[in-house]
Amino acid sequence: MTVGDGVAVPPVNADAAAGTATPRSEQESGLSVVGASQQASPGAVVAGFGLIAVGAVAGWMIWRSGASAAKIQPEDTTGVFLTLLVFAAAVERIVEPFSRWLPGRAAEATLSRTVTDVQSRVDVPTEADRAAIAVATAKVVRAKANRTIVAWGLASGMATVASSAGGFYVLHAVAGADWNGVAVWVDAVVTGVMVGSGTKPLHDLITRAQNGPPSP
């Protein structure tokens, strides 16, 4: 079994060792503990959006100071999406070194220690052992959700600053150089959020755009 980002957890098969089936109520209890931890915590959500807000303020300051580069205007929509894809890939690589400080490492280490302690004993794992593993697993799931939202906020904030400094604004790039529907610094935030969402959503978007609308 693998929990978190690449943390391998050896299976604990207490039922096979005891020759009995796990009660249904116990299974449902374990599922409810893990299911309740699927969503990110409020603190992680605040941190994620706070990082975007910091990027937005920095982008606005760059735009206000006149330090922004000239607008990048690709020739067609495909060029815009490909630029976004390359932009997102670059930001992903930049964020990777910071992943060691993002939430989740401590929870994964705790789960690994808990499983190792249970499996190192000769006797059959008890109900308390299974409960401890379920709780540790739930904490890893919650930590992974927290890590995802914080990493998204960090990537979006960094991409917003890069967008404002580099002159690439997705809405202006699509609508044309003369379009002034939103302020440039707002477009930088939109671009940053799109880039911060990662390469996979952008790749899917490009695929749908190339395939055209579905046939009736």
Image (cartoon, rainbow, N blue to C red):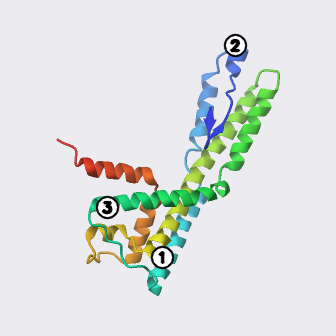
**Observer-nearest of 19 and 75:** 75
User: Relative to 24, is 111 above or below?
Assistant: below
Sort mark 2 into few (<14), some (14-19) or many (20+) by Cα contacts within 10 Å.
few
Sort mark 3 into few (<14), some (14-19) or many (20+) by Cα contacts within 10 Å.
some
The residue beneath circle 2 is 19
Residue at 68% x, 15% y: name it: 20
* Relative side of 158 to 97, left or right: left
The answer to whether residue 92 is seen in the rendering is: yes
Residue at 44% x, 80% y: name it: 68
Instruction: Give whichever of discs 3 and 1 has the lower sequence position.
Output: 1
* Residue 149 picture location, percent across and down: 54, 55
For mark 2, give the secondary structure: loop
Quarter of the rendering containing residue 101: bottom right
> Given the current orientation, which residue lies at the most extreme left position?
216
Instruction: Give whichever of discs 3 and 2 has the lower sequence position.
Output: 2
The residue beneath circle 3 is 79
For mark 1, give the secondary structure: helix
* Residue 202 picture location, percent across and down: 39, 54
Q: Nearer the viewer, mark 3 or mark 2?
A: 3
> Given the current orientation, which residue lies at the most extreme bottom position?
65
Looking at the rendered structure, the kind of residue marked 3 is: Gly
Q: Which mark is residue 168?
A: none
**Observer-nearest of 205 and 136:** 205
Residue at 54% x, 72% y: name it: 54
Quarter of the rendering containing residue 21: top right
Quarter of the rendering containing residue 177: bottom left
Q: Distance of mark 3 from mark 2, alpha carbons?
A: 61 Å
Q: Which mark is residue 59?
A: 1
Q: Nearer the viewer, mark 3 or mark 1?
A: 3
